[in-house]
Image (cartoon, rainbow, N blue to C red):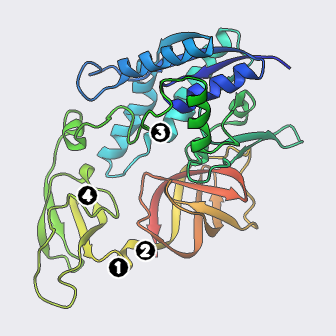
Amino acid sequence: MSQTIVVGMSGGVDSAVAALLLKRAGHRVVGLFMKNWEDDDDDEYCSTREDLVDAAAAADVIGIDLEAVNFAAEYKDRVFADFLREYAAGRTPNPDVLCNAEIKFKAFLDHAVALGAERIATGHYAGVREAGDGRFELLRAADAAKDQSYFLHRLTQAQLARVTFPLAGFTKPQVRRIAEEAGLANHAKKDSTGICFIGERPFRAFLNRYLPTQPGAMLDESGREVGRHMGLMFYTIGQRKGIGLGGRREGGAESGLPWYVAAKDVAANTITVVRGHDHERLKSRALHARDAAWVAGHAPSMDGSYGGKTRYRQVDHACRIESSAGDAFALKFTAPQWAVTPGQSAVLYDGEVCLGGGIIDMASA
């Protein structure tokens, strides 16, 4: 049945092909370009203008209208403020997860409904299906290398009920081929990477504009100072590059191994570093998470066995729920996980179905 569907168009090939597929399926399609950042959108690092031009060009080829809407105020209040709070607290947040829940599938959805849309669509690589009991399930995409269900795990059942993901069954090469055959100029456009509002700019310089820098001691596992850090917010668990200790040799069998960030102590303003990728201080079997959000519509059973991710670029690892109370839960993995990082999301899967997850606040051996 033909529907009115508003498609979030970013200027990239994925969202353009999503709109194209829906138009070919007979739907009334309207494109919506979201501007979510404007503090410095006139400098060399922001691609908003170029992206809008690309989105408009794609909409013209597809034969649909395109509207540009400014969600910068909502983004700053709902996403960026949380981003700064997390970094100030010594954690490493993932703003893309919150952006999806608060902007792309909330502010955008509300705006689309006001335009008369029955559904919204994006170019995310994920799937959605009715579970048969009035619920909806968030599914992995066919392209495992591009699957983005991890970033969508905070969506609600109400949001899932109004969303369609046209690229669920396609691989990235197939999407680019469809775009090229349709004459879309962005068919070979490079995928965007990193945090959307930072772009390719130097990360430390960006954070320095919003948070005060507090240098401190960098300690080895025995508590001996081996260097100085520039501020806790500039480092994350498992980080190797950019810690300023490369090449330092002090004798001993492991003196040539690279340094990694293993822990951050906010109260003492110190960072603990260890030598070697496989150091035991970088491995954790258990974690505690807060601010749980179950896209499945309810918390998973504690009797089940699940697949869990503690970061996006990671295969699932077998785990079980050790405890669950309110919006917090604890996970236990059957095998050690590397560099489990407070502030990142722990996301659970039951086969191809994404169940939801929470924000990691503590990891343990």
Q: Are marks 1 and 2 in contact (CB under 8 Å)?
A: yes
Mark 3 secondary-structure assignment: helix
Identified at 89% across, 41% down, the residue is 133
Q: CA distance from mark 3 to mark 2?
A: 25 Å
Q: Is residue 185 visible?
A: yes
The residue to which callout 2 is attached is 283
Pick whichever of labels 4 and 1 is earlier in the sequence: 4
Amino acid type of the residue that numbered disc 3 sits on in the rendered structure: Asp
Above or below, 134 against 33 in this view is below
Q: Are marks 1 and 3 in contact (CB under 8 Å)?
A: no
Residue 98 place in picture, x, y as percent: 50, 37
Residue 177 place in picture, x, y as percent: 59, 36
353 to the left or right of 258: right
The residue to which callout 1 is attached is 279
Nearer the observer, disc 4 or disc 2? 2
The residue to which callout 3 is attached is 96
Pick whichever of labels 4 and 2 is earlier in the sequence: 4
Mark 1 secondary-structure assignment: loop
